[in-house]
């Protein structure tokens, strides 16, 4: 048994080196976080001892406690020292400082970014004060987020003294715990990686309460009793899963803004003259969309033995709607007022067709729909959660997990 024992020990050591010493060997893959899955794949690569390989990692320390960061960075250094190239997309300060070379992209997000702000060896970039960026300013210590000197007062106990009382919670690493969670408060659940935070909040609380309050059929984590449920109307899980699996899904449809935008176009004089209904301005139903690409703007070409290739629709040129639909334009009242006293002015000045509205960023759309309070308020919330750079019609498949999560949050904040 000497050879298999040696191999077993070496593989277990790799998992310990990347901070996964708390996992049980029979843990189901579906219960692992994204960061844990990525670190397991990383451990398998260390064991393969490949040389001359390019490794790309997207935020490997995500979900990892700070004390385990050093282990992960040491592992990445070992991979590099074997003769491999490591490229890491990263926000974590410790990981950035431990890298050999930095490429800083910015200066902002979306249309405000996409440029190389700085690149070079870490010590040299930090010394060169001529180079400035949001990231470098914080790395140098020129900018800081100070710890507040005063904290806001919190009444104790909470108003009404209402608590969610959980008794005998057992899921994954949780060992029959009891906990009281105050209601109408912002509660943070912390602890080292693998201590059972997600198991408590998602498996025990969310699944069991969703079953009781909303008639869901989740197989929740083990729990002996949950009291205080009568104080809660419903429960919502805002996670980082995609807001849609197809290119048709986009931020405007998810937050409910697209229905109102279609109604605005239907109410224009041009649309009423032509007898267009709201469905005319939908890319999901026949009538106004380009039928060649069925409203996608792109056509999928299946390639044998190769990934599917997407090409721009040659009929609508990626605009998703037919020519007649694109002739209808909407503009805010302020735009109409500015041209009304000029006989020679173009009547369509300041107006946009449905395709152009789809390609507006949130920060462009907020002033454009200023006259429509409900629509303006929804878009304003999207801007306030940091998504001003996202296009209204941006495909859900191109959004990151954090962006999808903030879109879900804005949709909930827009509800009464």
Image: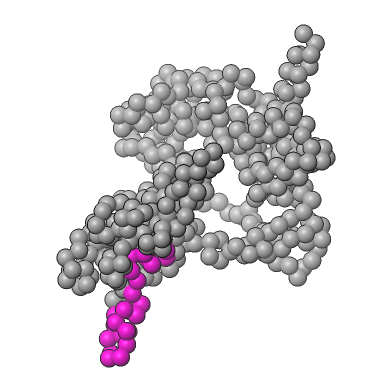
Quarter of the image for residue 209 reads top left
Q: Residue at x 31, y 63 (%)?
A: 322
Left or right relative to 258: residue 142:
right
Q: Quadrant of the N terminus?
A: top right
Q: Which residues are magenta?
A: 336-360
Q: Residue at x 39, y 39 (%)?
A: 236
Q: Nearer the viewer, residue 222 or 124?
A: 124
Q: In the rendered view, would you say 100 is above or below 334?
A: above
Q: Is residue 224 visible?
A: yes
- Residue 34 at x, y = what percent? 57, 36
Residue lying furthest front: 304
Q: Is residue 85 magenta?
A: no
- Residue 170 at x, y = what percent? 50, 20
Quarter of the image for residue 150 reads bottom right
Q: Residue at x 80, y 57 (%)?
A: 121
- Residue 245 at x, y = what percent? 42, 43
Q: Residue at x 77, y 34 (%)?
A: 50
Q: In the rendered view, would you say 405 is above or below 122?
A: above
- Residue 13 at x, y = what percent? 75, 24
Q: Nearer the viewer, residue 28 or 97?
A: 28
Q: Nearer the viewer, residue 232 or 86?
A: 86
Q: How is the image coloured?
A: one colour
Q: Is residue 411 visible?
A: no
Quarter of the image for residue 350 reads bottom left
């Amino acid at each position: 048994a000497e050879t298999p024992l040696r191999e077993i020990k070496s593989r277990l050591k790799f998992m310990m080196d990347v901070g996964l010493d708390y996992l049980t060997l029979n843990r189901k893959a579906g219960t692992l976080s994204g960061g844990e899955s990525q670190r397991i794949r990383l451990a398998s690569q260390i064991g393969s001892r490949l040389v001359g390989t390019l490794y790309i990692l997207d935020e490997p320390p995500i979900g990892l406690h700070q004390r385990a960061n050093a282990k992960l960075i040491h592992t990445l250094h070992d991979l590099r020292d074997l003769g491999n190239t490591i490229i890491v997309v990263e926000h974590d300060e410790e990981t950035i400082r431990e890298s050999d070379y930095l490429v800083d992209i910015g200066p902002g997000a979306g249309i405000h970014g996409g440029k190389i702000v700085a690149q070079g060896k870490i010590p040299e970039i930090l010394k060169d004060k001529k180079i400035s960026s949001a990231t470098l300013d914080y790395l140098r210590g020129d900018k800081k987020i100070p710890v507040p000197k005063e904290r806001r007062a919190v009444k104790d106990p909470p108003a009404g003294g209402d608590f969610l009382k959980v008794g005998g919670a057992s899921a994954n690493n949780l060992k029959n715990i009891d906990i009281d969670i105050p209601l109408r408060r912002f509660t943070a659940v912390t602890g080292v990686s693998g201590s059972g935070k997600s198991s408590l909040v998602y498996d025990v609380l969310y699944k069991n309460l969703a079953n009781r309050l909303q008639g869901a059929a989740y197989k929740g984590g083990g729990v002996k009793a949950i009291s205080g449920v009568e104080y809660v109307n419903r429960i919502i899980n805002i996670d980082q899963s995609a807001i849609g699996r197809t290119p048709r899904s986009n931020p405007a449809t998810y937050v409910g803004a697209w229905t109102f935008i279609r109604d605005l176009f239907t109410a224009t004089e041009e649309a009423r003259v032509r007898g267009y209904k709201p469905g005319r301005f939908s890319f999901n139903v026949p009538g106004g969309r380009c039928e060649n690409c069925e409203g996608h703007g792109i056509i999928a070409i299946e390639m044998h033995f190769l990934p599917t290739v997407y090409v721009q629709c040659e009929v609508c040129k990626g605009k998703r709607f037919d020519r007649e639909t694109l002739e209808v334009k909407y503009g805010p009242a302020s735009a109409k007022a500015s041209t009304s006293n000029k006989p020679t002015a173009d009547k369509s000045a300041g107006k946009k067709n449905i395709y152009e509205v789809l390609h507006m960023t949130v920060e462009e759309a907020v002033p454009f729909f200023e006259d429509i309070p409900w629509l303006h308020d929804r878009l304003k919330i999207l801007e306030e959660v940091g998504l001003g750079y996202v296009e209204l019609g941006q495909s859900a498949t191109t959004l990151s997990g954090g962006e999808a999560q903030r879109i879900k949050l804005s949709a909930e904040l827009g509800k009464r």
